[in-house]
Image (tube, rainbow, N blue to C red):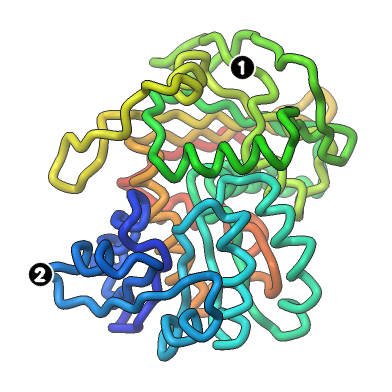
Amino acid sequence: MGSGQMVAVFGAYGHTGRFVVAELQKRGFVPVLSGRDADKLRMSASGSGLETRTASVDDPVSLDRALAGTAAVINCAGPFATTAAPVIEAALRAGIPYLDVAAEIEANVDTFAHFTDRARAAGAVIVPAMAFFGGLGDLLATAAMGDWTAADEAHIAYGLSSWHPTEGTRASGTISRERRDGRRVRYANGQLEYRTDNPPTLKWPFPEPMGTRAVIGEFTMADVVTVPSHLSIPEVCTYMVVEAARDLSAPDTPAPAAVDESGRSAQTFLVDVVVRSGDTERRAVASGQDIYAVTAPLVVEAVDRILTGRTRAVGVASAGEIFDAADFLRALFPHVDLELRL
C-alpha cells in the first residue's frame, strides 16, 4: 500500500484525473491535486481535505512547487504534446518518477526521443502511456510473448461496446491530426509510416461472447510506440470495432455518463492480443468496464511498483519493459479479467 506517500496528479480535475485521485486514496497514497485552473482544483478537492497546488506548463517554478515533497507525479492533463515535456522536466528536477496516461502517438514518440538518454544517465524512471491505450496493450503483448525473444507480428484488437470521448480525448485527437497534416499512421517494417489512403475494414474473431466483428484495421493507437520500444516485432497493428470508431468520429457523441457510484460509464471493453512467430501464435485477452476508469488502477499499480522497487528498467520505459507483465496484469483483478493462451 501507499503508506501515506504523496503523489502529485497534474490534471487532477479532469475526467481520468478524478479516477486516478480516487484510486490513489484507495491504495493508501495521498494525492496532491495540481493543474492550471485554481477554481477547478478547489471544486475537485472540496470536502476531501486534499492539498491543491496550481501550476502551469508555461511556469516551471509553479511546477516545481507542485511536485515539492512528492514521491512521484502522474500527468493526466492532455494534450500531452503540450504538457508531457514540461512536467517531465519538473520531475527530473525533483528527482521523482514520472508517469502519464498519454494516448497521443507523437507525444509518446517525443518522450522516448527527447528523454531516453537523460533519464537513463540520471537513473530516473519515466513511463509514458501508462493507460488503457499504450499500457494495457503493451502488457498483454509482452505477457503473450512469454519466453519468445522476437515475433513476426503483433495484433491488438479493441472491442469497445461504445466510445463516448471526453473533452480531453477530443482535444488530443485534434492536436494529433494537426501534427500529421491529416494523414493516418501505422507501424510496419519496423517503423512508423504516414499514409493518405483509407484504412482497411475487415473482420476480427474476438473471443466469445463478442465473436467476430467488423473492425477498422490500422486504427493506430499508442501501442505502436510502446510495444516496439522494447519487443523485437517489426509489424504491430491495432484495430477498433467499427461502432466505437464511429462514436469517436461523430461530433455529437456525448461525453461518458456515470452509471455507478465510482463514476464509471456503462462502456465495456475486450482487448484481444495475438502475437505470431512463423506458424505459431499466442494470445492474451483482457476485459472490463470503462476505458477511462480502468486507466486509474493501471497507473496507480505502476506507481506502487516503482516506489517499492518492483521494476526491471530505468530511463524511459513502457509498461511491458519495466514491469513483470503477467504478474502486473494479474494484480489488476477485479478491474481487468485476464486470459493467457500460450
Q: Position of residue 158 (x, y in %)?
A: 52, 27
The residue under the point 15% across, 77% down is 49
Q: Which residue is tagged 2? A: 47
- The residue furthest left is 47
Residue 80 visible to an observer of this rendering: yes
The residue under the point 36% across, 23% down is 253
Between 50 and 137, the one lying in front of the other is: 50
Q: Quadrant of the C terminus?
A: top right
Q: Quadrant of residue 50?
A: bottom left
Q: Quadrant of the N terminus?
A: bottom left
**Left/right of residue 338 with respect to residue 254 in the rendered view:** right
Q: How far is the residue under mark 1 from the one under mark 2?
A: 44 Å
Disc 1 to disc 2: CB gap under 8 Å: no
**Left/right of residue 176 with respect to residue 240 in the rendered view:** right
> Tag 1's secondary structure?
strand
Between 223 and 252, the one lying in front of the other is: 252
**Left/right of residue 62 with respect to residue 122 in the rendered view:** left
Q: Position of residue 37 (x, y in %)?
A: 34, 65
Between 148 and 36, the one lying in front of the other is: 36
| Type of the residue with mark 1 | Ile
> Which of the two labelled residues, at mark 1 and mark 2, occupies the earlier sequence position?
2
Q: Quadrant of residue 2?
A: bottom left
The residue under the point 45% across, 82% down is 67
Q: Position of residue 142 (x, y in %)?
A: 65, 47
Q: Against 129, is 199 above or below?
A: above
